[in-house]
Image (cartoon, grey):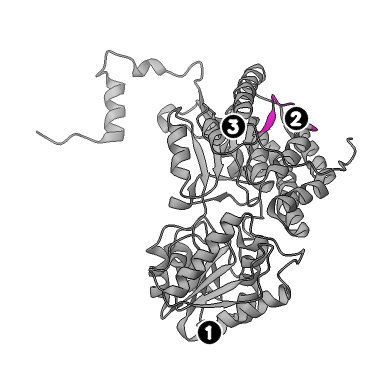
């Protein structure tokens, strides 16, 4: 077993030309390695996953420190919980179920082919490309990677230019477990990302913004590369009139404060009965202050990742104020890009906060008069990655689940469906396509090969010409019926 790493790697400027050249070499190596071993046995896949789990344990402090350095301050507990514990739980689940996932699935033949046999075999696709974002750089790199390894693939991982220290830390960790012919990590900025998505991968997994998703699809389409897209969107909270307002406010405040709201499944806005808007807005602010009495410099609270992102959030708030929004800060901002939660009421549709994914600690609270009106509001907008109903039960909850589209749902809280790895994680419509995690991730990154075995004595010659023989006419009559008289 390797010793625990001791030093945080320094951030260094990425040589884009060198990274692009390295990318082509690594892709060719992985293609050749896959051709030499196109179906890794279950034991090998399981051993690799176990080794990765052990490496995560050894590197947990280094990873947390690297992410904090990249963010300019990030909660070590949140880094370990999401970016280290999350992959560990996913590995445990995959190893526990891998034998069943890999087993060929028997399928039924048509009655016409009775006595023969059919099955689906799950075959590794080959070399999988994974594009990870900056907000959860380890979890969103390793989540698809775990599915790729479980399915028997090789993988190239492209990490964000906004997390250079984390990229080096992940590269160092993975090098302890995998040869680069199996798994390799690429850094670099836009030019490298474009070269990466243009490669003829056997599958490409992209986690990022809805604005970049179509560009990734266009690049992949040149090679007919299948894609999985996880794109985010405006995930609504829907509060019932009879909901426990204080409990809901606490959950929503946590969802907006975790990673400073820089999460694709963070609650984006809250739909609240009109009579309870002010009460709910105040309760969310109180809950945030209870979590974080001090925002500036507080180690448990995460900073906004870059000056550019911080400026974007300030522009959103300024736009809301200009258009009549009531903006209430739940704390005092500091000079270190740590932003308190801002709750906004009197929201209008022409405000940017009503139209753009916020991806930060801003919560618009919007009143509704009936469930019909609330559902109409949600369904009139692009499909979100998540939806969070609070206080609904019975027929009302069933109606919400059946009449709205979202990638996933957590009832009575936020985000926890993503942390349960027997559930698929994926979007719908503009929030993405395809899914990973659990069995669905294994299937997504496997070719589902249909296989039919003809029994030696099956009379297949009955289907040969010349046509019009008695048995052929009887078969057509049985399935299609007698043709109408002319």
Please name the residue shown 63% across and 48% down the image: 134
Q: Which residue is mark 3?
A: 128
The residues bearing labels 3 and 1 have C-alpha atoms spaced at a distance of 49 Å
Q: Which mark is residue 68?
A: none
Q: Does 183 lie within the magenta span?
A: yes
- In the rendered view, would you say 178 is above or below 50? above
Q: Position of residue 58 (x, y in %)?
A: 85, 44
Q: Which mark is residue 278?
A: 1
Boundaries of the magenta span? 176-185
| Majority secondary structure in the magenta region | loop
Q: Which residue is mark 2?
A: 178
The N terminus - image quarter: top right
Left/right of residue 124 with respect to residue 41 in the rendered view: left
The residues bearing labels 2 and 3 have C-alpha atoms spaced at a distance of 15 Å
- Furthest residue toward left: 486
The mark that comes first in sequence, 2 or 3, is: 3
Q: Does 225 lie within the magenta span?
A: no
Which mark is nearer the camera, 3 or 1? 1
The C terminus - image quarter: top left
Left/right of residue 202 with respect to residue 72 in the rendered view: left
- Furthest residue toward front: 335
């Amino acid at each position: 077993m390797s010793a625990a790493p001791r030093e945080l790697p320094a951030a260094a400027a990425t040589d884009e030309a060198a990274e692009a050249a390295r990318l082509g070499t690594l892709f060719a190596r992985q293609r050749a390695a896959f051709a030499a071993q196109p179906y890794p046995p279950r034991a090998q896949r399981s051993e690799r996953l176990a080794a990765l789990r052990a490496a995560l344990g050894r590197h947990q402090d280094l990873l947390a420190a690297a992410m904090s350095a990249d963010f300019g301050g990030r909660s070590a507990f949140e880094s370990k919980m999401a970016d280290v514990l999350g992959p560990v739980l996913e590995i445990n689940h995959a190893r526990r179920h891998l034998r069943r996932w890999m087993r060929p699935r028997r399928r039924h033949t048509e009655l016409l082919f009775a006595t023969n046999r059919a099955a689906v075999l799950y075959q590794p696709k080959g070399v999988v490309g994974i594009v990870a974002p900056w907000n959860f750089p380890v979890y969103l790199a390793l989540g698809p990677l775990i599915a790729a390894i479980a399915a028997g693939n090789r993988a190239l991982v492209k990490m964000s230019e906004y997390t250079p220290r984390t990229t080096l830390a992940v590269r160092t960790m993975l090098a302890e477990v995998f040869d680069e012919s199996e798994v390799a990590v690429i850094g670099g900025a836009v030019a490298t990302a474009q070269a990466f998505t243009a490669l003829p991968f056997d599958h490409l997994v992209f986690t990022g913004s809805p604005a970049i998703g179509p560009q990734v699809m266009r690049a992949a389409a040149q090679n007919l590369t299948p894609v999985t897209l996880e794109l985010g969107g405006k995930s609504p909270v829907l509060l019932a009139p009879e909901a426990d307002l204080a409990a809901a406010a606490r959950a929503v405040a946590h969802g907006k404060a975790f990673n400073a709201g820089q999460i694709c499944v963070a609650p984006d806005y809250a739909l609240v009965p009109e009579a309870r808007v002010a009460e709910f807005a105040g309760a969310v602010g109180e809950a945030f202050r209870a979590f974080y009495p001090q925002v500036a410099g507080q180690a448990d609270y995460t900073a906004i990742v870059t000056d550019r992102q911080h400026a974007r959030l300030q522009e959103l708030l300024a736009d809301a104020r200009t258009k009549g929004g009531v903006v209430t800060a739940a704390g005092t901002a500091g000079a270190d890009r740590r932003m308190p939660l801002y709750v906004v009421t009197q929201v209008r549709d022409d405000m940017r906060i009503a139209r753009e994914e916020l991806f930060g600690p801003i919560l618009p609270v919007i009143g509704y008069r009936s469930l019909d009106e609330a559902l109409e509001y949600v369904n009139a907008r692009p499909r979100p990655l998540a939806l969070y109903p609070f206080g609904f039960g019975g027929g009302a909850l069933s109606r919400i689940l059946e009449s709205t589209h979202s990638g996933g749902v957590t009832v009575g809280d936020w985000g926890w469906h993503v942390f349960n790895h027997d559930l698929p994680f994926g979007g719908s419509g503009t929030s993405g396509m395809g899914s990973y995690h659990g069995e669905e991730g294994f299937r997504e990154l496997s070719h589902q090969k249909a296989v039919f075995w003809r029994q030696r004595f099956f009379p297949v010659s009955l289907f040969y010409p010349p046509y019009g023989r008695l048995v052929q006419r009887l078969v057509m009559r049985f399935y299609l019926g007698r043709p109408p008289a002319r």
